Amino acid sequence: MPGAARAPGTPRKKAAVAGPGKAVNREPAEISKLEKYLSVITESLADDKGEEIVVLDLTGRASFADRMVIATGIADRQISAMATHLERKLGEAGLKRVLIEGANGSDWVLIDAGDIVVHLFKTEARAQYGLERMWGADLDVPPGGAPEAE
């Protein structure tokens, strides 16, 4: 419709903001590279004393990534260091384009490593945003139906 109001953003960004939903048609990442980078990420976070490290499989569920890693840090300084170390280690592993948001003293740092998105939180922020609840597989709706009753 000419003159109709349109929401800003690309369809991919709109789908990402909307959260999990219908199956997403996206070419999955090459598994060997994905596992290699995922190993670098989880080992780096563990080395930096990251707590409650969780890896969520988003394959077919998200248009922006195939895996999501969530970890908790105690203080801003620790979270910032975790992000910096992660960026360096991923670069050494061959992933050159790593984007970091919020690393300058924030309760939440986002690291975009292409097919893997990493969220580093302080405890309170992690509980507040509840990404595990939002993206966890236990909330998936089976095709053609409502969630199964327990």
Image: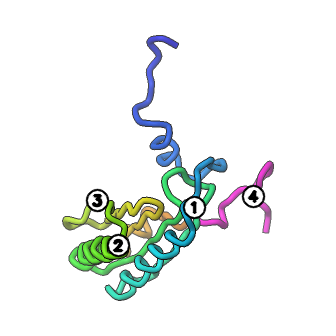
Q: Which of marks 4 and 3 is in front?
A: 3
Which residue, given by chain and number where applicable, does mark 3 sit on? 101
Whichever of callouts 4 and 3 sits on the residue coming sooner in the sequence is: 3
Q: Mark 1 belongs to which amino acid?
A: Leu
Which residue, given by chain and number where applicable, does mark 2 sit on? 90
Whichever of callouts 3 and 2 sits on the residue coming sooner in the sequence is: 2
The vertical placement of 139 against 143, above or below, is below
Instruction: Give the CA separation, mark 1 to mark 2.
Output: 20 Å
Instruction: Give the CA separation, mark 4 to mark 3.
Output: 34 Å
Instruction: Give the CA separation, mark 4 to mark 2.
Output: 38 Å
Residue 118 placed where, x, y %?
41, 67
Which corner quadrant holds the C terminus? bottom right
In the shown orientation, is residue 22 left or right of residue 98? right
Q: Main secondary structure of the magenta part?
A: loop
Q: Mark 3 belongs to which amino acid?
A: Glu
The vertical placement of 77 against 111, above or below, is below
The local secondary structure at tag 3 comes to strand
Which residue, given by chain and number where applicable, does mark 4 sit on? 147
Which residue, given by chain and number where applicable, does mark 1 sit on? 58
Instruction: Give the CA separation, mark 3 to mark 2.
Output: 16 Å
Numbered range of the magenta stretch: 133-150
